Image (spheres, rainbow, N blue to C red):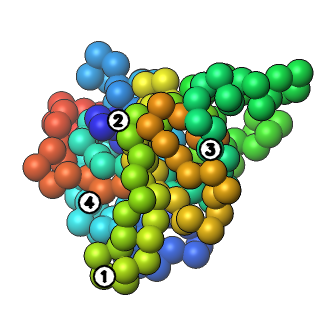
Amino acid sequence: MRVGVTKRVSRKSDTPFDGSFVGWANPRNEDPGSGDYCFAFDVPDYLRFRELGLPSIVEAGVAAFAESIECYPSPEAYDQAHAGGVKFASQCYIPSGMMTPDGDRIEPPESHAIFVAHVRHAQLKRNDFTGVPYYWAQVDALDFRVDVVIDPSIVTTPPRSGGVMSGSFWLSGRIREAARWVTPAYRTM
């Protein structure tokens, strides 16, 4: 996805190699400070980007690792399961790592989100190195398309194509080397 990266994030618990960025998904009009959703994401190779001028628009692969999750076979099943109670739309995104339920800012921002999304594709896979199974899904939460990784032990109903998933997630991403400085004009700001 295209991300307008606007801020570096350092936390006391970070090692020298750790780091995070705050950015906007799908920046508008080449403005890194605008877009569909603001979010923070951890970057496993953060030191490679110590020279990245901010703000910048980059291409990044972002994955959401499920911390808690519920899966439904269809949007209708999701709606029926939440009939009569408080529910989120079947496609929504909340940057839970950036604000408290009362709307106060979290500083430094955390790389967490809550979303409800439509499942485009889902599959049970195995880790090539460990052989441990996991669920992979590609989902849409409005204009936020992301790959989701799920430990099978935390889900009672597996994700499936055409279904809906709802939960809380940790966000991790990799900035693509070839697209590090998509908008060099913003480096001088």
- Distance from Cα at disc 3 to Cα at disc 2: 30 Å
Query: Is residue 37 something that shows in the picture?
Result: no
Q: Residues within 10 Å of mark 4 (few under 14, many from 20)?
A: few
Circle 4 SS class: helix
- Distance from Cα at disc 3 to Cα at disc 4: 36 Å
Q: Is residue 131 left or right of residue 15?
A: left
- Distance from Cα at disc 3 to Cα at disc 1: 27 Å
Residue 9 x %, y %: 49, 57
User: As drawn, which residue projects farthest toward the right?
Assistant: 84
Residue 85 x %, y %: 88, 26
Tell me the kind of residue under disc 1. Answer: Phe
- In the image, residue 113 above or below residue 35: below
Labels 3 and 4: the sequence-earlier one? 4
Q: Residue shown at 29%/16% (left/top)?
A: 29
Query: Is residue 159 something that shows in the picture?
Result: yes
Callout in the foreground (3, 2): 3
Tell me the kind of residue under disc 3. Answer: Cys
Callout in the foreground (4, 1): 1
Callout in the foreground (2, 1): 1
Residue marked by disc 1:
129
Nearest to the observer: residue 8 or residue 84: 84
Residue 106 x %, y %: 68, 49
Callout in the foreground (3, 4): 3
Where is the C terminus found, in terms of image quarters? top left
**Residue 49, numbered circle:** 4
